Amino acid sequence: MNCIFGIDIGGTEIKIGKFYQEHLVLKTSIKTNVSDGGNHIFSDIFLKIDELTQNDTAEGIGIGVPGPVVNGVVLGAQNLNWKRIEAQRILKERYPNCEIAVLNDANSAALGEMDQGGAKKYQNFVFMTIGTGIGGGIVINGQLVEGATGSSGEIGHIRVAFGNERQCTCGLYDCIEQYASATGIVKTGNQLRQGRDTVLNRIEVTSKNIFDQAKLGDEVCLEVVAQMIEKLATATAAIANIINPEAILIGGGVSKAGGFLLTRLQKRFRELAFYSVRDTEFRLAELGNDAGIYGDGFAVRKKIYGN
Ligand SMILES: [Zn+2]
């Protein structure tokens, strides 16, 4: 049978999904070997694809990478030790009969959610993934917006404070990632617990614990969540004012806080957004860590079969 691969290349793990049409029929993963400037990554993937196509014919390969992508060229991916990599060309040389798609991983997760997850009913939405960092993808009229240098949807690096308090991994200061990601939430938790009577002085300070304890009413944890919400509502209101999406979809590890997070975020968003975008819907993503492989598969399926 003809099959399609959706491959999500992360810093520690490469997730591989095999699809018959839109149906995910097999899911596996291999370790990411980032030694030698990430030179082994493609050969490792080739081995796996060849193993998984012994009784099938691959007709498309979509890959998602943690870095900006323009016309099939990855401009750089720190987590993979990649500088500029001509991913599309490398894949096409090895699999000349396959359609190839190369995407930024957050963009591909947005497409996955549109195809088979929480954004199925939307053609215009913003996807935010909130984990150790914050990434995003923007879909307008059913099409991914990639931008001049593949950097549309780099939501995590919107500035939301002005005191140069927290330096970001990108080199800038006070990016929202430093306040509203899991890492940022922990930073705020560690600041606010000092000298206070809070459970945070007795348990490990993690984003999950902070949300769990906020739900139970710990005052300091509630403050941490409120500060996180304030930054996130500020950024999402700005984004909505520019794009006027139907919905904002929240995924990533932090989104496991669920309705507790979403209700508070939406309430504050409504106070901060321009009146005509106030009714933007807020939804939780549904595909979790698999969103990327679905999106990579979707992107290449679209290249082969059209819409
Ligand atoms: Zn940044």
Image: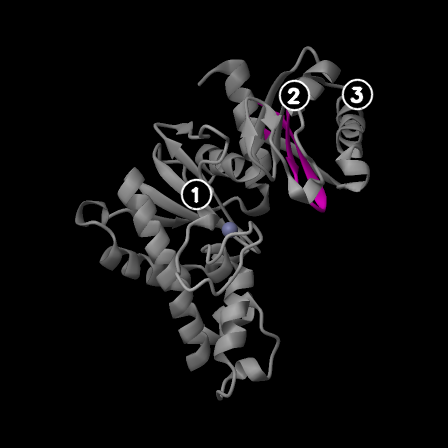
Looking at the figure, which quarter contains the C terminus?
top left
Foreground mark, 3 or 1, reads: 1
Q: Is residue 21 left or right of residue 228?
A: right
Q: Position of residue 211 (x, y in %)?
A: 48, 69
Majority SS type along the magenta span: strand
| Region rendered in magenta | 1-23
Looking at the figure, which quarter contains the N terminus?
top right
Q: Secondary structure at mark 3?
A: loop
Q: Which residue is mark 2?
A: 3
Residue at the extreme left: 275
Q: Position of residue 158 (x, y in %)?
A: 42, 50
Q: What type is the residue that disc 1 sits on?
A: Phe
Q: Which residue is mark 3?
A: 54
Is label 3's Cβ within 8 Å of ligand 1?
Answer: no
Do we see residue 156 in this rendering?
yes
* Nearer-N-terminus badge (3/1): 3
Q: What type is the residue that disc 3 sits on?
A: Gln
Tell me if label 3 and label 1 are in contact, CB under 8 Å.
Answer: no
Do we see residue 2 in this rendering?
no
Foreground mark, 2 or 1, reads: 1
Camera-side residue: 264 or 2?
264
Task: Give the CA separation, mark 3 to mark 1.
Answer: 36 Å
